Image: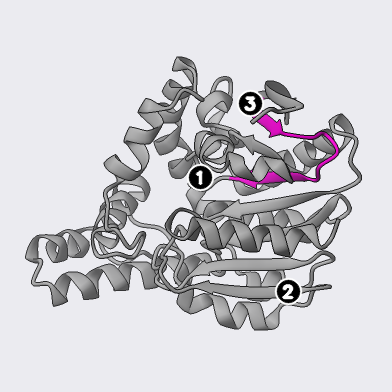
Amino acid sequence: MEYEIDEVRKISIGGVGQKIHIRGEKRTNPVLLFLHGGPGISNRDSVVNREKDLCDVFTIVAWDQRGTGGSYWGVKKETLNLEQLISDAAELVEYLCAALEKERLFVWGGSWGTELGTYLCFRYPEHIAGYVGSGQLVNGVLNEELSYDFAMDEAKKAGDTKAVSTLERIGRPVDGCYREVFKGMMAQRRIMKKYGGHSMNKGTYWTDTVLPLLRSREFSFTDKLGLALGYKRCLTYMWPTTSKCDFPRECTRFAMPYYIFQGAHDNNTPSALVQAYYDAIEAPDKDLIWFEHSAHGPLREEPETYKRLLREKLLQWI
């Protein structure tokens, strides 16, 4: 595959250097900006490499958000908060439209990226042509309660006394947060993932996340160091603000098409919350597509169907 544009750039956003990778076969193609999850887990490698077949019809932009990967260095902890990340995303959209000579672009979010993307679309709609979200955040407080309850219920059903003990020790989250934000969340997420709430293959964070990043050629050594150092830091400082979203109350009217691609078995960002939120949304067009064989990552678990629908939903607005 040959690309008219294939560039890794470090640009100033919000006063600090942040790294992006732009890749596409034709500069005339519409731009698709991916917003990764976490906070602090860059998917730059998987988006521009594993999903590179999308580059025939989109110019894909993958961004290491403030505080992680190639955007780790020089970031003060005081700036790791929801409002700053929304401002960064809006500034990046402006930059991309100018640099790539587009009036509007598409926003594509995963997990925490759906929270960032939803706020971005709601507050700064001018340059956004449409939105797709997977692992859709709806209400941060309820999200954590339901995810915890799933892990506890499954551990009890399995007679997993060690997991039950761990969950009792960290305690049910209060106001969206564990007593020890990072340690509590990681303990709960490991158990939730063990019982299929994150992916149907019931892998581990080591096999599904850490090893692919270590093996990646997309990230430089300093990028990988930024990933390792930034993950805990981003979650610790950002979670108290990012966990307070309540989209049914805050964000229901959108100026662009709004699509949710949701794994039916997702208990990381629980699917139980999605239908009622979707029903409340007002947009020029909307759709909620259920992936019946997926949990938190339908792009990875049902890639062919996912990418076919991504093309269908977005390209009709070109």
Q: Which mark is residue 259?
A: none
Q: In the depicted view, which residue is nearer to us: 219 or 167?
A: 219
Specify whether 168 is left or right of 89: left
Q: Classify mark 3: helix, strand or loop.
A: strand
Extent of the magenta region: 18-35
Lower sequence index among marks 3 and 1: 3
Please name whichever residue, 124 or 181, is drawn nearer the observer in this view of the structure.
124
Asked if residue 199 is among those painted magenta in the image, a careful observer would answer: no
Query: Is the residue 116 above or below the residue 264 in the image?
Result: above
Disc 1 marks which residue? 39
Binning the other alpha carbons within 10 Å of mark 3 as few (below 14), some (14 to 19) or many (20 upward) gives many
**Residue 20 in magenta stretch:** yes
How is the model colour-coded? Answer: one colour
Of the residues under marks 2 and 1, which one precedes in the sequence?
A: 1
**Apparent side of residue 40 relative to residue 87 in the rendered image (left or right):** left
The CA distance from mark 3 to mark 1 is 16 Å
* Numbered circle sitting on residue 19: 3
Give coordinates of residue 2: x percent, y percent: 68, 27
The answer to whether residue 89 of the structure is visible from this angle is yes
